[in-house]
Amino acid sequence: MWYSFRGARQREQINAFLILIHQDLSADVYVNDFPIIYEGMHKRDLQAGEIVMLQDIADIRSLKFLGIEINKTDNLIFSFRIGWKFGLFFDFAQWESGHFWDVDALYRELGWHYKRLFFQKEYEILENRPMFEQMRSDGWFPFIQILGVEFVELSHFYKDKTKFLSLLTHFVNKFDKDRVMRFVNRWWNNKLFEQKKNIILAGIEAYLTNTQAGFINCIKNLPSEIDGILRLHHFEKNKTGKRPHYGELTQHLKKEAEKKFDSMEPLSLPGEFCRYLDEVFLKDFDLKTGQVDWSRHSTMHGVANVEDYTKVKALQCILILDQMYFYLS
């Protein structure tokens, strides 16, 4: 077998390599310094040449190699490193029974494997169902705005409850005016959000007063606007006179999100988020049994417990709206 070798001088310090084995049994081997391009979605506006940080990434769709052509008949070995962790992908089936690459699908699959390793801790939290369900029942979700370090940080609070309230308070307080308005001001690029700007801003400004009265006003304001955006978007797309039930609204949201986040296992988790809306945010209440958890229904019908009108719940309403913005824009 003949091969061409391109890469770093110090072979003993290999962090990544790509091997393409061609049908004539020649091969191209690339080591360390071959350019890799990630196609994805970011949380904020980025400038050309700006360094992209973990906390900037909303999703990774595909992974490609700049200036390297992969033939549909090539067998492939690809190793990559993230921190101290290594990923290895290989496929030697291209010469069997006419099974050849769909190269675009290959790039998407490579992007998925890279994303799984890059966000390994986040996926591990989701797969730890008892912990994730506890976080979810408290109103938390891997919202796009806290993906990365902060969602992992939040999960650590649930492992040791001795300092839970103080840690959670510090966590929520990081969402001050500057931070909240940085992402809220992007919402007005969406027509539905822009039409409701004055109403939504009233809720946001109430939250930013950092007072109990402000949190109450925020919670009384934003859940109805979440409901309204769901309904108006559903109506615009379907133009039906029938009034949809909440299950139809969340399924519509899921389909819209899947069209936009068309990567494998998108980090925005459309299916999980709609389950979160159905089972937490839109959860019904039962006065006879005393089952009155915080939800859109318990607050809008005026039966929610006074102690549930907190800064945490107000922030969660804001993060739900932000998640919907990413789904619907």
Image (cartoon, helix red, strand yellow):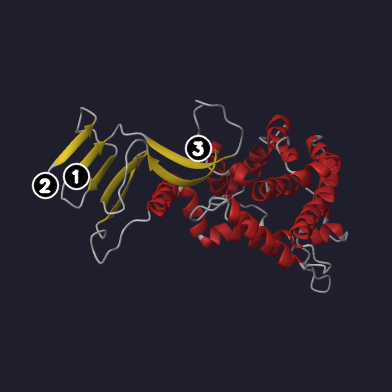
Q: CA distance from mark 1 to mark 2?
A: 7 Å
Residue highlighted by disc 2? 1
Are dots 1 and 2 in contact, CB under 8 Å? yes
Question: At label 2, which amino acid type do we have?
Answer: Met
Residue 124 relative to residue 85: left or right? right
| Label 2 vs label 3, nearer the camera | 2
Badge count? 3
| Label 1 vs label 3, nearer the camera | 1
Q: Residue at x 35, y 34 (%)?
A: 35
Q: Residue at x 18, y 37 (%)?
A: 4
Disc 2 is placed on an element classified as loop
Going by the picture, which residue comes out furthest to the bottom? 288
Residue 233 relative to residue 301: left or right? left
Lower sequence index among marks 1 and 3: 1
Q: Position of residue 324 (x, y in %)?
A: 69, 50
Looking at the rendered structure, which numbered label has been put on residue 54? 3
Looking at the rendered structure, which numbered label has been put on residue 27? 1
Image height of 100 relative to 219, above or below: below
